[in-house]
């Protein structure tokens, strides 16, 4: 997501778009949080158009910038550059760029991490997204270690709705989110392309034969795991479980959180929001566009609260935090008692500055990645902790 434009005129916007111009969130000196929670100074600042962050298994915080840099946030508040592939990355115009990173489940021994980025066009090849692997050596990527894992389809002139998130599931497979290629929403319903989908691949780049559409699709399209998405910019996998929540950025009316399921069709562009129309799968939560603390126009980061050490009150364990970029808030999704299959959302933090991603540390803190408040001002990582009542 190289640039983000928010157009809010009574009816909110389509999505994450093409320019970081102005702020739609009122500027607050600090987020407004529930009693007992605190937000200190930025954990790190000085970032430029960040898109994703993730904790390495060893506790280091890695952050991607859309132009092609991977940064490491140091405990003393400084940044180091792990990798710079800006000469290869197409980050303008629109939402192309270095979109996300994740770590191999065996990172402690193989030191592999994976990136999802838009490859610049050449004289013979149009721009396209790709998943690649690098090898880490301390705080630097090993020179020449880039390996192509999976190549996605060529993009059209449209530069929006790239999706981007990637992560490993409990099954050891790599899941990749893709947008519908901008002005081509019809692609999301077809098994003949990789746009508007969640993909599932082996970490070597091969395609598992138990994928739900393996026998119906052909070639790389056999990687399709779920379809009917518009712009799944972020998704999250619950630690130690198979639960996947997919944050799908809406168009004119609704933002969605969808429950990941093999073979699911989430309905785009036939439906947006709840439709009760089988065989399409309704979201577990949809919220409308607007400018209140419960509405927004672009759902972004999400994270399950299942840390190694529980710092927040017990009632938060297993809940799902999710953020809206232009609403400037973080809300909390919790499941109703086991006898119910429903979910309810409640407020958690307001007055944030363009939150783009969320992560929970092993120590139980909630980190948020902010694109900042005004054009040109540095982005930062904030940290929310619980000190008790």
Image (cartoon, rainbow, N blue to C red):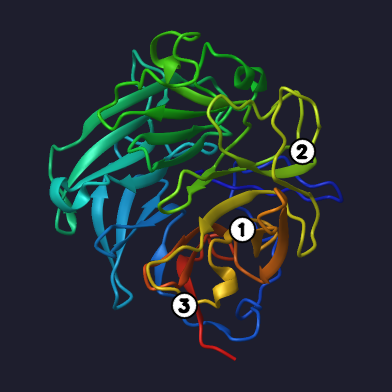
Assess whether mark 3 and mark 1 are in contact (beta carbons under 8 angstroms). Answer: no
Q: Which mark is drawn over residue 311? A: 3
Mark sitting earlier along the chain (1/2):
2
Mark sitting earlier along the chain (1/3):
3
Q: Residues within 10 Å of mark 3 (few under 14, many from 20)?
A: some
- Residue at x 49%, y 26% (from the top left corner): 225
Q: Residues within 10 Å of mark 2 (few under 14, many from 20)?
A: many
Q: Position of residue 348 (x, y in %)?
A: 66, 70
Determine whether the residue tagged by mark 3 lies in a helix, strand or loop: loop
Q: Position of residue 230 (x, y in %)?
A: 63, 32
Determine whether the residue tagged by mark 2 lies in a helix, strand or loop: loop
In the foreground, 2 or 107 = 107
For the C terminus, the image quarter is bottom right
Residue at mark 1 to residue at mark 3: CA–CA distance: 20 Å
Q: Which residue is mark 2?
A: 273
Q: Residues within 10 Å of mark 1 (few under 14, many from 20)?
A: many
- Residue at x 41%, y 45% (from the top left corner): 100
- Residue at x 42%, y 24% (from the top left corner): 127
Assess whether mark 2 and mark 3 are in contact (beta carbons under 8 angstroms). Answer: no
Question: Is residue 367 shown left or right of residue 278?
Answer: left
Residue 17 visible, this orientation: no
Q: Which mark is drawn over residue 323? A: 1
In the foreground, 24 or 42 = 42
Q: Nearer the viewer, mark 3 or mark 2?
A: 3
Question: Is residue 224 shown left or right of residue 16?
Answer: left
Q: Position of residue 220 (x, y in %)?
A: 39, 15
Determine whether the residue tagged by mark 1 lies in a helix, strand or loop: strand
Q: Nearer the viewer, mark 1 or mark 3?
A: 3
Residue at mark 3 to residue at mark 2: CA–CA distance: 34 Å
Residue at mark 1 to residue at mark 2: CA–CA distance: 17 Å
Mark sitting earlier along the chain (3/2):
2
């Amino acid at each position: 997501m190289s640039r983000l434009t928010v157009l809010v005129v009574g009816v909110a916007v389509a999505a994450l778009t093409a320019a970081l111009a102005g702020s739609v969130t009122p500027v607050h000196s600090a987020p407004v949080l529930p009693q007992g929670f605190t937000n200190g100074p930025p954990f790190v600042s000085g970032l430029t158009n960040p898109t994703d962050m993730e904790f390495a298994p060893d506790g280091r915080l890695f952050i991607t910038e859309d132009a092609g840099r991977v940064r490491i946030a140091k405990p003393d508040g400084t940044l180091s550059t792990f990798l710079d592939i800006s000469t290869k990355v197409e980050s303008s115009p629109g939402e192309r760029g270095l979109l996300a990173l994740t770590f191999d489940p065996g990172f402690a021994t193989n030191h592999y991490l994976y990136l999802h980025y838009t490859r610049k066009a050449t004289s013979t090849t149009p721009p396209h997204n790709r998943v690649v692997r690098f090898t880490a050596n301390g705080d630097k990527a090993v020179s020449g270690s880039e390996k192509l894992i999976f190549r996605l389809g060529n993009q059209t002139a449209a530069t929006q709705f790239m999706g981007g998130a990637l992560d490993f599931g409990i099954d050891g497979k790599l899941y990749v989110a893709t947008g519908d290629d901008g002005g081509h929403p019809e692609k999301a319903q077809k098994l003949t392309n990789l746009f508007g989908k969640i993909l599932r691949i082996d970490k070597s780049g091969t395609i598992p034969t138990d994928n739900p559409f393996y026998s119906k699709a052909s070639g790389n399209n056999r990687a399709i795991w779920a379809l009917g998405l518009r712009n799944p910019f972020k998704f999250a996998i619950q630690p130690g479980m198979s639960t996947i929540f997919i944050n799908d950025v809406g168009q004119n009316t609704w933002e969605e959180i969808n429950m990941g399921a093999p073979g699911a069709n989430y309905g785009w562009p036939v439906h947006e929001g709840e439709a009760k129309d089988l065989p399409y799968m309704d979201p577990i939560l949809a919220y409308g566009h607007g400018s209140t603390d419960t509405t927004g126009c672009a759902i972004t980061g999400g994270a399950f609260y299942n840390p190694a050490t529980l710092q927040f009150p017990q009632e938060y364990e297993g809940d799902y935090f999710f953020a809206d970029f232009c609403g400037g808030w973080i809300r909390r999704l919790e499941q109703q008692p086991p006898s119910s299959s429903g979910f309810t959302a409640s407020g958690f933090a307001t007055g944030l500055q363009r939150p783009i991603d969320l992560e929970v540390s092993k120590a139980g803190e909630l980190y948020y990645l902010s694109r900042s408040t005004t054009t040109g001002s540095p982005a930062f990582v904030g940290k929310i902790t619980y000190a008790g009542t």
